[in-house]
Amino acid sequence: MGLFFRSSNSDSGDYDFDRLRRDLVDEYGIQSAAFSGGLGFLDMCDAENASNEQLIEMARKEGFNLNKYKR
């Protein structure tokens, strides 16, 4: 569960992947500092190098509202 986003997600549409990546990196950075230490840091590194499809999957896992990232 993410700290900032919680809503239903949708598969269709074009997404702002740069913004999604930045928000995921921020989310994992906060989790790293607040909860999981090294594991959050590793997730943050994974988000920086993830493909667009992986970003969508990571965002779903964290409960992000993907509609906010549609162009």
Image (spheres, grey):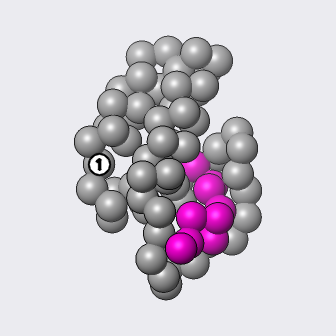
Which residue is labeled 1 in the image? Answer: 50
Residue 4 appears anywhere in the view:
yes
Dividing the picture into quadrants, the one containing residue 27 is top right
Q: Which one is in front, 12 or 58?
A: 12
The x, y position of residue 47, in whole percent, is 37, 41
In what element is the residue under mark 1?
Answer: loop
Place of residue 42 in the rendered image (x, y in percent of width and height, measured from the top left): 36, 27
SS majority, magenta: loop
Please say whether residue 66 is visible from this viewpoint: no
Check the image and report above or below for 3 versus 34. Answer: below
Q: Which residues are the magenta region?
A: 62-71
User: Which image quadrant for residue 56?
Assistant: bottom left
Instruction: Judge whether residue 53 is colored magenta.
Output: no
Q: Is residue 37 above or below residue 21?
A: above
Look at the picture and state if 66 lies above or below 3: below
Magenta stretch contains residue 66: yes
Q: Residue pushed farthest bottom?
A: 12
Residue at figure coordinates x 54%, y 43% from the top left? 23
Q: Which residue is painted at 27% across and 56% down in the image?
A: 51
User: Which is more toward the observer, 60 or 70?
Assistant: 70
The amino acid pointed to by label 1 is: Ala
Quick check: 38 left or right of 29? left
